[in-house]
C-alpha cells in the first residue's frame, strides 16, 4: 500500500510538470499583453521596456520556459504582477477559504446524498423518491450563478438570515487562522454559499447511490442478511449501503474535477475570496504568474483528491489490493 | 414440528399472476431430513423462501398455513419472523458463492448472525464461530478471511457453519452444492449429513438432482409445476417410485440404480407455463402414459403404500409403467408427440 502511494505521488509529480508545461504555453499564446494591464501603455517606451525586462518578458519563449520550470521545481511560482507579492503567498491566503467552502459543500452533499439515496432505493417508488430525483436534477441543471442569486435574494435580501457577500463582515480583521475562520461571523457567511454549492454537488452522490443501492439490493448477500434475521436497519446500512458506497467513491473522485467549475461560479457570485474568484480575476488582469500558479495548485488538488479517493476505496473494498 | 398445510404462493408479474406453488402440504419431524426434488422452476426455492417469509416483493402466500411448533407463521409480524429466522429456521441459500458480503470477513458475518439473536457477547460469539468452523472442517484462521480469499467449497462450508451457529430447529438448504464441482459436492454432502445427525436438527434439502436425495434424506417430495407429484419415505421411493415423472427423473440421474444400463434419458419437453391455469395433471403433456382423463381432471395425491403418496390416476398400473419407462422408445414417443403438437401452430 505504502509503495503504491509513493508510486502514485511520483506519477502525480510527472503529471503536474506536464500540466505546468501546458498551462505555460496556454498563457503565452493567449491574446492580450500583460504589460498593458500592469503598466499604463501611455508611459514612455523605454520605461515599458525596462519593466518587460524586469519581468523577463522580453526573453524567448524557450528561455522563459526554462526559467519557469526551474523555479517551479523549487516551488517558486514567481511574483504576482497585480499584487506585487509572491504567488505562493497569494495562493496561501486564498486556499483555505476555497478548501473550507468546497469541503463543507461536499460534506453536505455527500452526507445527504448518500443517506437519502440509500433511503430512496430502499423505499423504491415512494413519493419522496421522485421528489429527490427531481430536486437534485433541478439544482444540477439550473445555472449555478442563477441559483446563487436566487438564494441571495431569498435568504439575504428578503429574509435577511445570512449575509450576501464575502467571508466576513466589513471592518473585521483577523491575523491568525483561528481569528479568521473559527468564529461565528465566518460561519454565518459560509452557510449560504456552501448550501448552494452543496445543492449543485448533490445530484452526483444521490443518484449514483440510489442506482448502486438498487443493484446491490438484488444481490444474494442481502437476502442472506435478511435470512440471518438482522434488523432492517442493519441490512440497509451495514450491508446494502456499505457496498453501494463503492461506486459513489469512484464517481466522487471523477466528479472533483468537474466540481471546480461550479466552485468558481459560486465564489464569484458570493464574492468569496477564494482561489476560484482569484483565478478569474488573474486571467482578466493577465496576471500570468498568479493564474499559472493557481491552475497548477488546482490541478494538484484534483490529483490529490483522486489519490485520496483511491486510497479510501482500498479501505472500503477488501478485494482491492494496490501494488 | 413443522406442518405445511395447503400452501399456495403467487407471483404478480407484468404478464399476470403466476401460481408458483399450488396446494403443497408436508410435515417435518424433529431430526428428520426431507428432500424436495424437481426440475428447475418447479417452485422449490419459492417454498423455501415462504417458510422464512422471505419472498420477493411481488410474491405472496395466497393460501395455506405454515405451522411451526403449532404457530402459524403466515401473518406473523415482521419482527416476530425476524427473530425466528436464523435462530430457529436457518437458510443455506442456493448461491453460496454470492451469499457472503464481500466487504466483511467471514467471521464477522457469522458473529453478526449470532449477535442478532442473543446477547452472549462478542467473545462467546467468537468462540462459537470457532466451534462451528471446526464442525465443517475449516481452520480457525479462516474466520478472518474475506470471501474472495476462499474457494467455492470453503465458502459453502462457511455458509453451512453460519446456518449451524445458533443450533436451529430446521436448516433449509436450497441446492447447497449445485455451484460446486462433483468431488467437492460429494464431500460437502457427507459432511452435512454427518452434522445433521450429530446435532439432530431437522433439514429440508432442496435439489434438482434426485440422486443426492437418496444419499442424505429420509423422506422425499417430488415437485412438478408447483405441485407435489409424489411424497414418500426415501427407501420406499427409491425401491419403487409410483409417479411417471419420478420414473422419468430416475432415468435422468445415473447414480441411483443403473436402470437402462445405457446413456441417460431425459424427460422430453419443458415444464408447464404456470401463468395459465390448466385443467388436469400438470405433467400430462410430457407423460408417456397420459390419457384424456389426465388432460381434464387433476389427480389428487393418493396413498399407495404406508408413507407413500402419489398424484396419478393410474397408480394401479405402475408395474406396467415401470417396465415401459425403462425403455428409451417410450420417451422418444413423447418427444415426437410434443413436436407434432407444436408444429401445426407455427
Ligand atoms: N420474483 C419472481 N417473480 C416472478 N416469478 C418468479 C419469481 N421468482 C420465481 N418465479 C417463478 O416461479 C417459479 C418457481 O421458481 P423457483 O421457486 O425459483 O423454482 P426452483 O427453485 O424450483 O427452480 C418459476 O416459474 C419462476 O419463473
Ligand atoms: Mg431454486
Image (tube, helix red, strand yellow):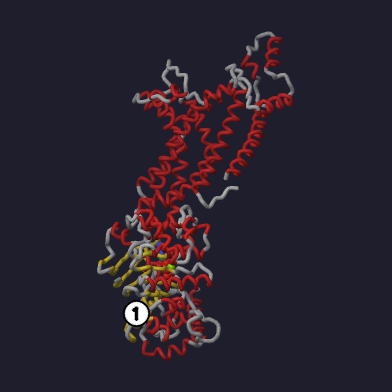
Looking at the image, residue A57 lies above or below residue A139: above
Which quadrant of the figure has residue B195? Answer: bottom left
Residue depicted at 51% across the width and 80% down the height: B254
Residue B186 at x, y percent in the picture: 50, 73
Residue B109 at x, y percent in the picture: 42, 56
Instruction: Identify the subunit bearing mark 1.
Output: B
Residue depicted at 32% across the width and 58% down the height: B82
Visible residue check, residue B267? yes
Quarter containing ligand 1?
bottom left
| Residue tagged 1 | B298
Q: Secondary structure at mark 1?
A: loop
Residue B345 at x, y percent in the picture: 48, 75
Looking at the image, residue A59 lies above or below residue B312: above
Task: Work out which residue is located at the far top of the displayed protein and give it.
Answer: A44
Residue B57 at x, y percent in the picture: 36, 59
Which quadrant of the figure has residue A5? Answer: top right
Q: Is residue B308 left or right of residue A51?
A: left
Q: Is residue B156 left or right of residue B304?
A: right
User: Quadrant location of the N terminus of chain A?
Assistant: top right
Which quadrant of the figure has residue B171? Answer: bottom left
Looking at the image, residue A277 lies above or below residue B250: above
Amino acid at each position: 500500500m505504502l509503495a503504491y502511494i509513493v508510486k502514485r505521488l511520483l506519477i502525480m509529480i510527472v503529471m503536474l510538470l506536464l500540466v505546468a508545461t501546458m498551462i505555460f504555453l496556454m498563457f503565452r499564446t493567449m491574446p492580450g499583453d500583460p504589460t498593458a494591464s500592469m503598466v499604463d501603455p501611455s508611459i514612455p517606451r523605454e520605461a515599458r521596456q525596462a519593466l518587460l525586462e524586469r519581468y523577463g518578458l522580453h526573453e524567448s519563449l524557450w528561455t522563459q520556459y526554462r526559467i519557469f520550470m526551474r523555479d517551479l521545481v523549487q516551488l517558486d511560482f514567481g511574483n504576482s504582477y497585480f499584487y506585487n507579492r509572491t504567488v505562493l503567498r497569494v495562493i496561501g491566503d486564498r486556499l483555505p477559504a476555497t478548501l473550507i467552502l468546497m469541503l463543507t459543500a461536499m460534506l453536505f452533499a455527500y452526507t445527504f446524498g448518500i443517506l437519502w439515496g440509500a433511503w430512496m432505493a430502499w423505499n423504491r417508488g415512494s413519493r419522496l423518491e421522485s421528489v429527490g430525483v427531481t430536486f437534485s436534477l433541478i439544482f444540477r441543471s439550473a445555472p449555478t450563478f442563477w441559483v446563487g442569486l436566487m438564494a441571495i435574494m431569498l435568504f439575504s435580501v428578503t429574509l435577511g438570515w445570512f449575509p450576501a457577500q464575502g467571508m466576513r463582515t466589513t471592518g473585521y480583521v483577523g491575523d491568525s487562522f483561528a481569528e479568521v475562520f473559527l468564529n461565528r461571523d465566518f460561519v454565518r457567511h459560509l452557510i449560504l454559499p456552501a448550501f448552494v454549492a452543496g445543492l449543485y454537488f448533490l445530484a452526483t452522490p444521490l443518484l449514483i447511490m440510489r442506482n448502486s443501492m438498487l443493484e446491490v439490493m438484488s444481490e444474494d448477500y442481502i437476502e442472506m442478511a435478511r435470512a440471518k434475521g438482522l434488523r432492517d436497519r442493519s441490512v440497509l446500512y451495514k450491508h446494502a449501503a456499505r457496498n453501494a458506497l463503492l461506486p459513489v467513491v469512484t464517481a466522487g473522485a471523477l466528479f472533483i474535477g468537474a466540481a471546480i467549475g461550479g466552485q468558481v461560479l459560486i465564489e464569484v457570485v458570493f464574492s468569496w475570496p477564494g482561489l476560484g474568484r482569484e483565478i478569474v480575476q488573474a486571467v482578466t488582469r493577465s496576471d500570468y504568474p498568479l493564474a499559472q500558479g493557481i491552475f497548477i495548485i488546482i490541478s494538484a488538488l484534483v490529483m490529490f483528491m483522486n489519490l485520496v479517493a483511491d486510497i479510501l476505496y482500498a479501505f472500503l473494498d477488501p478485494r482491492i489490493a494496490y501494488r | 414440528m413443522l406442518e405445511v398445510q395447503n400452501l399456495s404462493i403467487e407471483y404478480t408479474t407484468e404478464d399476470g399472476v403466476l401460481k408458483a406453488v399450488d396446494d403443497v402440504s408436508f410435515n417435518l419431524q424433529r431430526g428428520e431430513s426431507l428432500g424436495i426434488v424437481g426440475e428447475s422452476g418447479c417452485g422449490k426455492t419459492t417454498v423455501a423462501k415462504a417458510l422464512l417469509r422471505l419472498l420477493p416483493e411481488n410474491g405472496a402466500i395466497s393460501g395455506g398455513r405454515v405451522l411451526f411448533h403449532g404457530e402459524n407463521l403466515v401473518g406473523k409480524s415482521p419482527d416476530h419472523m425476524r427473530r425466528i429466522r436464523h435462530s430457529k429456521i436457518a437458510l443455506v441459500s442456493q448461491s453460496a458463492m454470492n451469499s457472503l458480503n464481500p466487504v466483511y470477513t467471514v467471521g464477522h458475518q457469522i458473529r453478526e448472525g449470532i449477535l442478532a439473536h442473543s446477547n452472549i457477547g462478542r467473545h462467546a460469539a467468537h468462540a462459537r464461530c470457532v466451534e462451528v468452523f471446526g464442525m465443517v472442517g475449516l481452520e480457525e484462521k479462516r474466520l478472518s478471511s474475506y470471501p474472495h480469499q476462499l474457494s467455492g467449497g470453503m465458502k459453502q462450508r462457511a455458509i453451512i457453519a453460519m446456518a449451524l451457529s445458533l443450533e436451529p430447529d430446521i436448516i433449509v438448504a436450497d441446492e447447497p452444492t449445485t455451484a460446486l464441482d462433483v468431488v467437492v459436492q460429494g464431500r460437502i454432502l457427507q459432511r452435512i449429513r454427518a452434522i445433521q445427525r450429530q446435532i439432530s436438527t431437522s433439514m429440508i434439502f432442496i435439489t434438482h438432482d434426485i440422486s443426492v436425495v437418496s444419499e442424505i434424506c429420509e423422506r422425499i417430495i417430488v415437485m412438478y409445476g408447483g405441485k407435489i407429484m409424489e411424497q414418500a419415505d426415501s427407501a420406499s421411493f427409491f425401491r419403487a417410485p409410483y409417479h411417471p415423472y419420478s420414473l422419468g427423473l430416475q432415468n435422468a440421474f445415473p447414480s441411483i440404480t443403473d436402470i437402462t444400463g445405457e446413456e441417460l434419458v431425459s424427460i422430453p419437453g419443458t415444464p408447464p407455463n404456470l401463468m395459465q391455469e390448466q385443467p388436469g395433471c400438470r405433467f400430462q403433456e410430457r407423460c408417456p402414459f397420459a390419457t384424456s382423463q389426465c388432460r381434464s381432471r387433476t389427480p389428487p395425491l393418493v396413498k399407495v403404500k404406508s408413507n407413500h403418496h402419489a398424484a396419478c390416476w393410474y397408480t394401479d398400473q405402475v408395474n406396467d409403467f415401470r417396465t415401459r419407462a425403462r425403455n428409451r422408445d417410450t420417451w422418444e414417443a413423447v418427444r415426437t408427440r410434443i413436436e407434432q403438437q407444436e408444429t401445426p401452430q407455427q
